[in-house]
Image (cartoon, grey):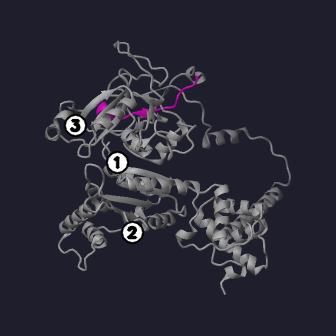
Amino acid sequence: MEYYKLLNLEKEPFSNSPDPDCFFKSRQHKACLQKLELSLRLRRGLNVVIGEVGTGKTTLCRQLIKRFSRDEAFETHLILDPHMTDPAAFLKVVAGMFEREPHAPAGDWADHKEFIKQYLYKRGVEENRVVVLIIDEGQKIPAPILEILRELLNYETNEFKLLQIVIFAQREFEQVLERHANFADRINLLHVLGPLGFTDTRLMIDYRLQKAGAESSLGSMLSFPALLAIYRATKGYPRKIVNLCHRIMLAMIVKNRKKAGWRLVRSCVNSSSVKTSGVWRKAIGVLLVVVGVAGIAYTGFMPVKEDTGRKTVSNKAFPVKKESVLVTLPDATVTKKDLLPAETTVAEPTEKAVAQPARAATAAQPVAVNEPVAEKAPVPAARVPEAGAPAKEVQTAKKIRPEAHTDAVVRSRPETLGLIRLRDNETLSWAMIKVYGEYTNFRRRQIAASNPGLRDLDNIFSGQAIAFPAGVQAGLRLPGFLRWIRVDSVETVSAALDAVRRYSTKEAPLRIIARWHREQGLRFDIIFWKYFSSQDEAARYLADLPDGIRMKSTIFAGWKEDTVFYANPCPGIG
């Protein structure tokens, strides 16, 4: 006999299968579904939903399929495992899903690609249907398949994309997007799922019980302390909530209980993996008690005199971090050629530290490539002297002293790049990729810290002002042979984003390079995503551009020495 019948339920309330009928629409899941439906109906192209294991991605995927199954204007296809290293095999699978005839398309991968193109045109233009390709477990997509998906997104009319792609993936997919900027740049919607809050956890449990036919209220089956214990043990992850509640229902039957309290919930928690860790904690506690008793017996309760020598040794082994001081760099240790134009960063000195004599620093070590600085505040950069040059004090961000032989204006390093106002159908992820060249959790946390008034970064209203912090892209090494094509250079990030909106196209996408120099101040260069290994290669690319943008564009070889970058001008190299 099924256990749920013993509880006067019609069906199992806490099944771990992705049943769309048992899908609880929490606030974040409801918002995600609404955004996806709007994007798909507008045929915007690529949509990505990212979340930790157990946040409800697969259930959300099934709910999306169910929602459009009753709409004749939509045609949905699902790929459960996209891990295919061979692009030809992937194209064959997609072509097989699209094929409505008895026979599958014959030929090589080029034939499959042409078949897909003709099929999408027929269904999307002639029959005015929306073709949706949903991919679950998107973190398994290899690089060659990402390139195929990017090519499929190129099939479009002047008004919309012929293929709509929705990818559900775990958090590892964020690293994939970082490595493939050309693919990430096509994302229209990027929604990040998190765990549920306590209120949604309680509502989810009640919703499942009601769907299973429970006649009584949630309070008659689970006490409030029990609900708190469930939330504390599961941390709001839906899959963990379902599994724990299933064990609670079984324990109620075994113990002949009609209501579960805090103790019963804790016993169910301890009966799983938590039990092992609890045993170890108790064992470690007993061991510490034994060791403590043995130590007391050994010393014989005799008072011990303070050992001044021990304090000195302790300070050497575990030095206490003191306030930062101004440092000097040694002569002829690192040449300009070795680190051009890399930066060495030091902490901001305090007034007390400034009064101390300068200390000699060791040779500057190269900073890791593409490694962002700490989140708390922008770190000032130290100038590396040329070989043979006398040592100079490191200049800080707040007090930068010009050289004695120059009359150039010295400007302070900014803490923010400025304010950006998104327009209709623009997302925060799109703006982050344009400004920073990447969409990462680190950048996202920086923006959240700079905008404490924004409660939901995934639900930003059109025209709402967003502050973009000045997170330094440290450790860059720009090879001297590289060339870039610049469309314009402006003083504000909003003007730079307007230029991107105006001139960027699918064939020639643009991005922003935010940079700072003590003589020029903060500037924003609008450049093409593509960079070039020679002047001739850049000239050939420039010659193929439309006249309107070609006349505004110029080829340049890089930026001034000691330039501070807030985005990487050459992803994959610098």
| Three-letter code for the amino acid on which mark 1 is drawn | Asp
Which residue in the protein does label 1 denote?
A: 185
Q: Residue at x 46, y 52 (%)?
A: 35
Mark 3 and mark 2 in contact? Answer it, CB < 8 Å: no
Task: Give the quadrant of residue 500.
Answer: top left
What span is colored magenta in the figure?
Answer: 335-350
Q: Position of residue 291 (x, y in %)?
A: 76, 61
Task: Give the quadrant of residue 2.
Answer: bottom right
| Three-letter code for the amino acid on which mark 2 is drawn | Leu
| Callout 3 secondary element | loop
Which quarter of the figure is the N terminus placed in?
A: bottom right
Dot 1 or dot 3: first in sequence order is 1
Q: CA distance from mark 1 to mark 2?
A: 23 Å
Q: CA distance from mark 1 to mark 3?
A: 21 Å
Q: Main secondary structure of the magenta part?
A: loop
- Where 15 falls versus 304 (above or below)? below
Q: Residues within 10 Å of mark 2 (few under 14, many from 20)?
A: some
Q: Is 337 positioned to the left or the right of 247 in the image?
A: left
Dot 1 or dot 2: first in sequence order is 2
Q: CA distance from mark 3 to mark 2?
A: 42 Å
Specify whether residue 142 is painted magenta.
no
What numbered label is drawn on residue 78?
Answer: 2
